[in-house]
Amino acid sequence: MEAGLKLDKTFFQRDPIICAKELIGCTLGFAGCDGIIVETEAYAAAGDRACHTWSRPSAREFVAKHQPGTAYVYLNYGMHWLFNFLTRGGENAGFVLIRSLMPLNGIEIMQRRRKRQKSEDLCNGPGKLTQALGIIGEHHGIDPLSAIGWKLCPRKTEFGEISTSTRIGISRAREYPWRFFLTGSAYVSLPRPQTANHA
DNA sequence: GGGCCGATTAGG
DNA sequence: CTAATCGGCCCG
């Protein structure tokens, strides 16, 4: 377990796979609602056929023109906003998709937005957590480390075990074990692949 | 302009 | 299992 994990600009100046793993346990919040990140996925800008950069010129332009740590927010299936961090470590750029949170603050607001009561159902999916936190397209391109209303805090030095699995919901490049989640957490999105292993 | 696709979700 | 719903992309 690494000590003294800091969460500043330099955190995101690394490989998206490393960032995805180390974001587990960190706190993400917006406008009074927040939670602990318990599930992430990494997407590599180069060579990863599941990454937007593979088929979207606009995503490649985003990677080239924004600083590491910038929010990459997009609408999926015409309905759900999905939230990512841009990361870039030398030649290895990419995104970290935030897939699940364990809700901490603003529970009642999240319950109202989600039309759900159980705290396990508020943020256990990438489209659910953006709805719960109120993240929408206008947040695309902002910097959560400095933007008003945003919260991004490092995790405690001691933290639970992290498991890995292949990524969820993609049709291409299914083979990479780039999903990370807090082992045994009830706040992780379903399904949990049986291929999960310790990271 | 038209057609296709998709890092999802809720409901039957 | 499927419908919902639309931005990005490619084609023409």
Image (cartoon, coloured by chain):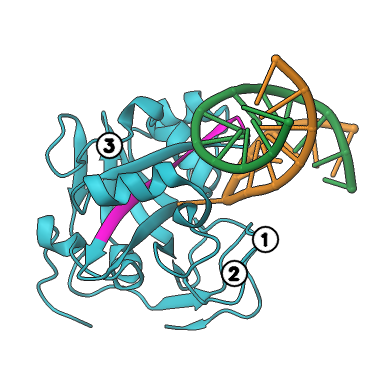
Chain colours: A cyan, B orange, C green
Residue at point 45%, 67% (across, down) = A181
> Where residue A171 sits: x, y (%)?
67, 60
Q: Is residue A131 above or below residue A189?
A: above
Residue A35 in view: no
Task: Give me the disc on residue A31.
Answer: none
Res A105 → quadrant: top left
For label 3, the SS is loop
For label 1, the SS is loop
**Are the residues flagged by discs 2 and 3 from a single subunit?**
yes
Q: What residue does disc 2 label? A: A173
Q: Is residue A160 above or below residue A187?
A: below
> Where residue C4 sits: x, y (%)?
74, 24
Q: Is residue A20 magenta?
A: no
Q: Amino acid at mark 3?
A: Gly
Q: Is tag 2's residue or tag 3's residue first in the polypeptide sequence?
A: 3
Q: Is tag 1's residue or tag 3's residue first in the polypeptide sequence?
A: 3
C9 or B9: nearer the viewer: C9
**Are the residues flagged by discs 1 and 2 from a single subunit?**
yes
Does A70 sit left or right of A7 as displayed? right
For label 2, the SS is loop
Q: CA distance from mark 1 to mark 2?
A: 7 Å
Q: Amino acid at mark 1?
A: Ser
Q: Amino acid at mark 2?
A: Ala
Does A138 sit left or right of A7 as displayed? right
Q: Is residue A162 above or below residue A25?
A: below
Residue at point 56%, 66% (across, down) = A167
Q: Is residue A40 above or below residue A71?
A: below
**Range of residues picked out in magenta:** A78-87
Quadrant that contains the N terminus of chain A = bottom left
